[in-house]
Amino acid sequence: GCTKVHAGCTHCYAESLAKRTGQAVWGPGGTRVKTSPANWAKPLKWNKEAAAAGQRARVFCASLADVFEDWAWSMLDHHGNRILACDVCGELHADSEASDSESCKCGRFKQRMPWASMHDVRLALFKLIDATPWLDWLLLTKRPAYIRKMWPAFFPGGYIAEAGAMNQEGPRPNVWLGTSISDQATADQYVPELLKCRDLASVLFLSAEPLLGPMNITRLSEEKGLASPGVDGIDWVIVGGESGPGARPMHPDWVRSLCYQCAATEVPFFFKQWGEWEPLTEPVDRAAVMSGKGDRWRFVNLDGNSGTFGVAGHCVVNRVGKAAAGRLLDGRTWDEFPKEVDA
């Protein structure tokens, strides 16, 4: 579960999936659901396999949520029951397990435990992260300003301190922190906040997906009088177009520009997909595009506007679906990763 915070969230695939499966209700008054214990046990298996192979593995965490969402209500389990959090050891329990005689492994009676919040589940997540050193955990957020105050310290033995107690031994080597941006406004707002977390994680990355307009991540933001994030200080950039119903088209020059900015400072660049709309290289009849037959063709301008001619740099795009559109940029795939931690 999550709450939409900017234009990139408009057609959230996670919300659509949750509506179909009944997993969670989006919005500040919705629900937040912890997945099953079996799901939470998978990383322990992956970590064991990675250690045996001597090769690190990457885990994209919480693809249907935001780890750093500031949400204060009670958490539910995958059956829809409220979760209890042991206020002695932090262990999480389903409310349905509570009875007069049942207790936590530490001896605390379950009936006396408070309801679990997202804070409690977040601490359980970081305990799992610290227990799986062969996994590189990708934590992507649209709330980078909350990372530091929600970041728990790590102590030998797996003890997790309260949020706000900062790790004094350097970054978590198996965490990659990223923020999701879609246009210049979100880049100017979010990336400086991410850069404040340089000491917390081994990798900082940007996910420009869906990319909804041109973006210069090396320029000065004149409106705020602050240095924009820039590529310097960022270890990886991901770019992708939007898919699914209502998907908005992406101009290829927006992608090329970010690719060039990364190349100029040797930052790895990963192009994930065009999304629903494929840019056309061959000439297309203007009358056919203007007719909008079947909503097959559109044109998108460099300034981010779509649907009108008259602006230099427009590109005609064809709605062919994510699979057909593919992920080739100028005849090649871009699958670059941070070199120092490349699996």
Image (cartoon, rainbow, N blue to C red):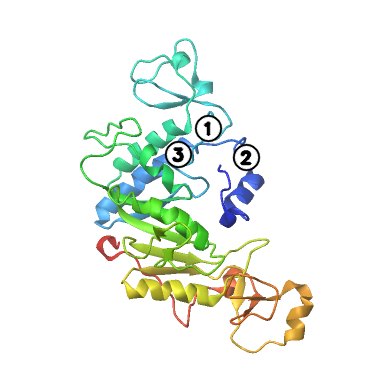
Type of amino acid under label 2: Val
Which mark lies nearer to you, 3 or 1? 1
Q: Position of residue 87 (x, y in %)?
A: 39, 21
Task: Identify the residue at horizontal 45%, vertical 62% (top origin).
Answer: 222
Q: Which mark, by number, is residue 287? A: none
Q: Position of residue 133 (x, y in %)?
A: 27, 47
Which mark lies nearer to you, 1 or 2? 2
The answer to whether mark 3 and mark 1 are in CB contact below 8 A is: no
Q: In screen coordinates, is 212 left or right of 201?
A: right
Q: Position of residue 64 (x, y in %)?
A: 53, 47
Mark 3 vs mark 1, CA separation in Å: 12 Å
Dot 3: within a 10 Å radius of its alpha carbon, few (fewer than 14), some, or many (20 or more) residues? few
Which residue is labeled 1 in the image? 77
Type of amino acid under label 3: Ala
Dot 2: within a 10 Å radius of its alpha carbon, few (fewer than 14), some, or many (20 or more) residues? some
Q: Position of residue 190 (x, y in %)?
A: 45, 53
Look at the picture and state if 119 lies above or below 330.
above
Q: Which mark, by number, is residue 38? A: 3
- Counting residues from the N terminus, which is met first, the one under dot 2 or under dot 3? 2
Q: Secondary structure at mark 1?
A: loop
Mark 2 vs mark 3, CA separation in Å: 22 Å
Which residue is labeled 2 in the image? 25
Q: Would residue 255 be visible to someone looking at this image?
A: yes
Task: Identify the residue at horizontal 35%, vertical 75% (top origin).
Answer: 263
Task: Identify the residue at horizontal 47%, vertical 83% (top origin).
Answer: 331
The image shows a total of numbered marks equal to 3
